[in-house]
């Protein structure tokens, strides 16, 4: 991007004024000065970061996040990644906050998530980065599109246009889960003082000639005239929207159901947030036989293909985001539980159980009743002293299982008959949805990373939930790095604590 010397001088003057205002705690004036400087010269990574910090100081986290991303586009900086992580955490994007922090140590740089060509980079910076570059239907307007009277619509021609483009139907009301207090095997971790989870309403939205651009880290839904629909978009969607021109728009005739979304390749999120949401279509009066295509995240794993086939979905109906990175459908349909952020909704668990438990033998005598789930096949959050732990558990009748080695239905059958399950925190525990009430579960955590998504499933299913937090001593893990996000750290299990639980 070419910037005239005169513009650079003026930009620097605004920048220096901003620093002075900031030093004297005139923060609003500092924001205005930084904004004007960046309008003239947007290629200032440090200034974007400073502006983001100021926005977040006033709890304007969305603006702060955009500033942090602008900074990271220009220069990868661990400090900015941490600021981004904190801002995401503050708006409730817990899992995304973890991933933002993890970018520091996993070499999955922000630029890898948002690849920019020089031409696209220039197009983005030609936009005014300080005015919202997205014309979007406000949340309250989207929620009420189907509830406006004809007289109201005639008075609001803009809403009338969108009522013709968008049909938004609420399937389930907001809900609340009262969590069952867990049972610690050692000390009581402060995370578990939480008492409830509030779930958003579940919806099905149909967008005439709707567009979607999706990757595994975000999905953006817009109307035909590029109005951004934030309530049904996922992930860091604002910035993905700006990059749509890097892929040609593919027009697809007929009805397309958008299953491609943030974290759509992760088994846990696929099971509880994506696949299970398909049942919302039937509740909205949309027979699957009337759907022409389903858009899914690439690469399309075999287990996802097998699960969709159980619903009668032909593989020829599957479109992937590699082949259709930017798609416009004659009618785009989005079944969505809302931003549940990793908490399985009750209706998702009920659908999964109703669909898959009848497909397995629940009276098999060959399946183990006591199982330990190993994460040895993955590269993080493994049990450091697993050999010792496996020997201890084997002597007490446990069988070690690697869930990724089993088919989906084999996992369903295994969990449906298990009586005791011990496992480090990981996606395999999503299968707790298939357990019988009073099944005993012991979840293993590293001390700095405790997240209760599986505790919530246990509360939904009336399971007997315990947890054991790594004491943080006697560890010899090569993955203990000061810059490593705690969710990636390996776990040391104090076997003496398990002895008390299982009995000698």
Image: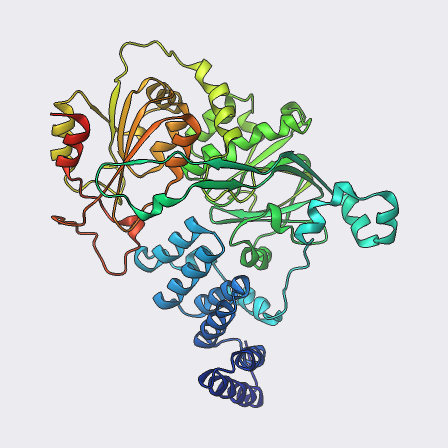
User: In the picture, residue 386 is in which quadrant?
Assistant: top left
Q: Quadrant of the N terminus?
A: bottom right
Pinpoint residue 369: horizontal percent, then vertical percent: 26, 18
Foreground pick, 313 / 423:
423
Viewed as shown, does residue 97 lie left or right of 317? left
Is 483 situated above or below 383? Answer: below
Pinpoint residue 346: horizontal percent, then vertical percent: 50, 30
Does the image show residue 47? yes
Is 125 situated above or below 23? Answer: above
Q: Quadrant of the C terminus?
A: top left
Pinpoint residue 122: horizontal percent, then vertical percent: 56, 70
Residue pictured at 22% horizontal, 58% vertical? 481
Is 449 situated above or below 49? Answer: above
Does the image show residue 298? no
Foreground pick, 387 / 189:
189
Viewed as shown, does residue 360 lie left or right of 285? left
Residue pictured at 50% horizontal, 24% vertical? 350
Residue pictured at 25% horizontal, 24% vertical? 371
Viewed as shown, does residue 368 lie left or right of 1? left
Residue pictured at 46% horizontal, 71% vertical? 53
Is 235 situated above or below 65? Answer: above
Pinpoint residue 281: horizontal percent, then vertical percent: 63, 29
């Amino acid at each position: 991007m070419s910037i005239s010397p005169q513009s650079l001088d003026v930009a620097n003057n605004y920048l220096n004024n901003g620093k002075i205002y900031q030093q004297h705690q005139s923060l609003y004036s500092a924001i205005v000065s930084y904004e004007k400087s960046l309008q003239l010269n947007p290629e200032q990574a440090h200034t974007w970061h400073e502006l983001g910090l100021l926005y977040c100081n006033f709890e304007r986290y969305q603006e702060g996040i955009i500033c942090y991303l602008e900074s990271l586009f220009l220069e990868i900086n661990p400090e900015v990644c941490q600021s981004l992580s904190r801002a995401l955490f503050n708006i409730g994007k817990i899992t995304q906050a973890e991933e933002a922090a993890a970018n520091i140590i996993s070499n999955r740089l922000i630029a890898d998530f948002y690849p920019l060509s020089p031409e696209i980079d220039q197009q983005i910076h030609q936009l005014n980065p300080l005015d919202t570059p997205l014309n979007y239907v406000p949340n309250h307007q989207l929620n009420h599109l189907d509830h406006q009277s004809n007289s109201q619509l005639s008075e609001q021609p803009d809403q009338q246009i969108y009522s013709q483009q968008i049909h938004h139907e609420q399937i389930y009301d907001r809900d609340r889960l009262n969590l069952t207090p867990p049972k610690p095997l050692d000390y009581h971790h402060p995370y578990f003082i939480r008492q409830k989870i509030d779930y958003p309403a579940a919806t099905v939205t149909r967008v005439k000639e709707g567009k979607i651009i999706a990757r595994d880290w975000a999905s953006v839904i817009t109307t035909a005239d590029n109005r951004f629909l934030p309530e049904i978009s996922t992930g860091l969607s604002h910035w993905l929207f700006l990059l749509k021109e890097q892929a040609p728009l593919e027009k697809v005739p007929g009805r397309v159901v958008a299953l491609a979304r943030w974290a759509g390749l992760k088994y846990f999120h696929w099971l509880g947030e994506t696949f299970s949401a398909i049942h919302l279509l039937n509740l909205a009066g949309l027979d699957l036989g009337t759907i022409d295509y389903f858009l899914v995240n690439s690469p399309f794993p075999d287990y996802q293909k097998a699960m969709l086939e159980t619903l009668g979905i032909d593989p020829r109906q599957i479109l992937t985001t590699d082949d259709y990175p930017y798609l416009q459908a004659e009618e785009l349909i989005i079944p969505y539980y809302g931003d549940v952020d990793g908490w399985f909704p009750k209706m998702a668990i009920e659908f999964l159980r109703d669909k898959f438990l009848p497909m397995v033998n629940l009276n098999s005598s060959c399946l183990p009743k006591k199982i330990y789930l190993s994460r040895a096949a993955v590269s993080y959050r493994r049990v450091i002293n697993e050999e010792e732990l496996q020997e201890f558990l084997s002597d007490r009748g446990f069988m070690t299982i690697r869930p990724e080695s089993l088919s989906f239905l084999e996992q369903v059958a295994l969990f449906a008959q298990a009586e005791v399950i011990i496992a480090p925190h990981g996606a395999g525990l999503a299968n707790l949805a298939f357990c019988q009430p009073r099944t005993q579960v012991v979840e293993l955590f590293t001390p700095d990373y405790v997240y209760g998504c599986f505790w919530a499933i246990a509360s939904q299913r009336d399971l007997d939930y315990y947890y054991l937090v790594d004491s943080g001593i006697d560890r010899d893990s090569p993955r203990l790095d000061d810059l490593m996000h705690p969710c990636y750290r390996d776990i040391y299990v104090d076997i003496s604590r398990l002895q008390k639980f299982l009995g000698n």
